[in-house]
Image: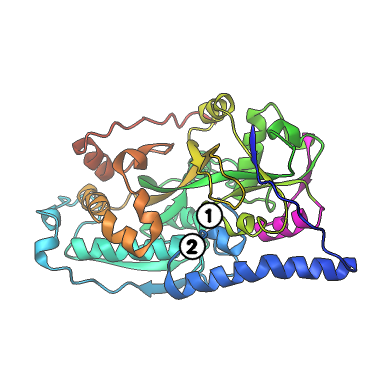
């Protein structure tokens, strides 16, 4: 089943070169404007300002492509007043087991034009306003993959990473040639749904057989997501004609007729998809319950997700799919009491974080533990146990 926008699209007239230039301008201008807006305000507009806003890959691996990296940005402490601090939150003592308070920590995020960086900045400011003795330096980085390598070698203390990439890192698969260690999960933060844009009439994932399909850049997280989704339908990349394009390039190729479909894993609405609506007919392919169950059974980092009707112009009904998550990860060097305090403050500050960044609205203890396939930090576990949230124990022996 799929949901299709219905309107008559007129093919651009004129020489092919002028047509391609016009299409490129139509796609890249709004993407560039969105990226600039994200840099200037750290906020999201009508479309997500994450890796999708720069036409980058949904795993967070390429989130910072073309953006500033390696920059140390100290988030100023917010004086919220002692009466707003969580009761006893600054009095936990790790008893010498790991890093405790006072603490100066580093948080790896993503590119300055992506979602991870402004979200991490908002969260860091909120945590410092709640926890006395905590200072957090927010780093612009290469996002998920780079962050997990940095956590493993002790270069940073915390990071935002996508949960599927965390799974790959812990098991030494996909993007990682060997398993990484030294870090644990703290909380799932917000969803990044799998979106499959296709020509009207494609109908289902099975309808992609024999079609020209972009599955993302070589080595990108979305390319692995595409392989896993095809696998759930009994297919492989050998059943389609594979193109390796980024999101903005995929949108251009789709409008120019070079490809029939493309995979996109990013917050919805996504700029590279939204820009198609006034220019070309398309449909979003659903991932049925049967195939979602099969996918989640094999890859537990996926969760069910509904793209609400009206998210994209012309698609009025809900579209069922799956999603991965951006998640907060901590070094195992951090003491349990410190991580407990930060986890407790994270959810207590939901309103403050959501006011600074729209993705903060997804903060919820039950949601934060779903689809996380690596072990949780003991400090985070302590918080979830107190909150009455049941934690699924991952089987790290499975490939």
| Residue holding disc 1 | 60
Circles 1, 2 touching at the beta carbon (< 8 Å): yes
| Residue holding disc 2 | 110
Q: x and y percent of residue 395 in the render? A: 43, 29
**Nearer the N terminus, badge 1 or badge 2?**
1
The foreground one among 84 and 145 is 84
Q: Give the residue drawn at x 74%, y 33%.
A: 207
Q: Is residue 140 visible?
A: yes
Secondary structure, mark 2, is loop
The foreground one among 196 and 169 is 196
Q: Give the residue drawn at x 90%, y 68%.
A: 15
Q: Quadrant of residue 202?
A: top right
Q: Residue 131 in magenta?
A: no
Q: Is residue 206 above or below residue 77?
A: above
Q: Quadrant of residue 204?
A: top right
Quarter the N terminus occupies: top right
């Amino acid at each position: 089943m799929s949901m299709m926008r219905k309107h008559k699209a007129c093919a651009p007239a004129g020489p092919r070169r002028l047509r391609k230039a016009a299409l490129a301008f139509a796609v890249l201008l709004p993407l560039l404007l969105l990226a600039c807006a994200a840099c200037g305000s750290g906020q999201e507009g009508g479309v997500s300002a994450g890796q999708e806003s720069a036409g980058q890959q949904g795993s967070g691996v390429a989130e910072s492509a073309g953006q500033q990296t390696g920059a140390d940005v100290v988030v100023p402490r917010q004086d919220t007043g002692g009466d707003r601090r969580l009761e006893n939150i600054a009095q936990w003592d790790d008893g010498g087991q790991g890093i405790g308070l006072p603490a100066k920590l580093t948080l790896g995020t993503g590119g300055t034009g992506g979602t991870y960086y402004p979200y991490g900045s908002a969260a860091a400011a909120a945590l410092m306003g709640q926890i006395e003795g905590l200072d957090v330096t927010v780093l612009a980085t290469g996002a998920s993959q780079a962050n997990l390598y940095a956590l493993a070698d002790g270069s940073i203390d915390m990071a935002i990473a996508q949960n599927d990439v965390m799974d790959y890192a812990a098991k030494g698969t996909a993007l990682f040639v060997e398993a990484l260690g030294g870090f644990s999960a703290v909380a799932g933060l917000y969803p990044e749904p799998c979106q499959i844009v296709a020509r009207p009439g494609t109908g289902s994932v099975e309808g992609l057989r024999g079609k020209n399909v972009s599955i993302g850049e070589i080595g990108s997280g979305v390319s692995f997501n595409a392989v896993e989704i095809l696998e759930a339908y009994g297919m492989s990349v050998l059943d389609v004609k594979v193109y390796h394009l980024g999101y903005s390039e995929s949108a251009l190729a789709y409008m120019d007729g070079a490809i029939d479909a493309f995979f996109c894993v990013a917050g919805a609405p996504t700029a590279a998809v939204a820009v198609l609506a006034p220019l070309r007919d398309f449909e979003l392919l659903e991932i049925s319950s049967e195939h979602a169950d099969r996918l989640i059974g094999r890859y537990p980092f996926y969760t069910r997700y509904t793209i609400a009707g009206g998210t994209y112009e012309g698609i009025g009904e809900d579209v069922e799919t799956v999603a991965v998550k951006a998640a907060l990860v901590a070094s195992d060097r951090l003491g349990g009491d410190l991580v407990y305090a930060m986890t407790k403050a994270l959810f207590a500050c939901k309103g403050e974080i959501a006011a600074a960044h729209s993705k903060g609205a997804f903060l919820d203890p039950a949601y934060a533990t779903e689809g996380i396939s690596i072990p949780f930090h003991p400090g985070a576990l302590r918080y979830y146990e107190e909150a009455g949230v049941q934690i699924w124990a991952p089987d790290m022996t499975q490939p």
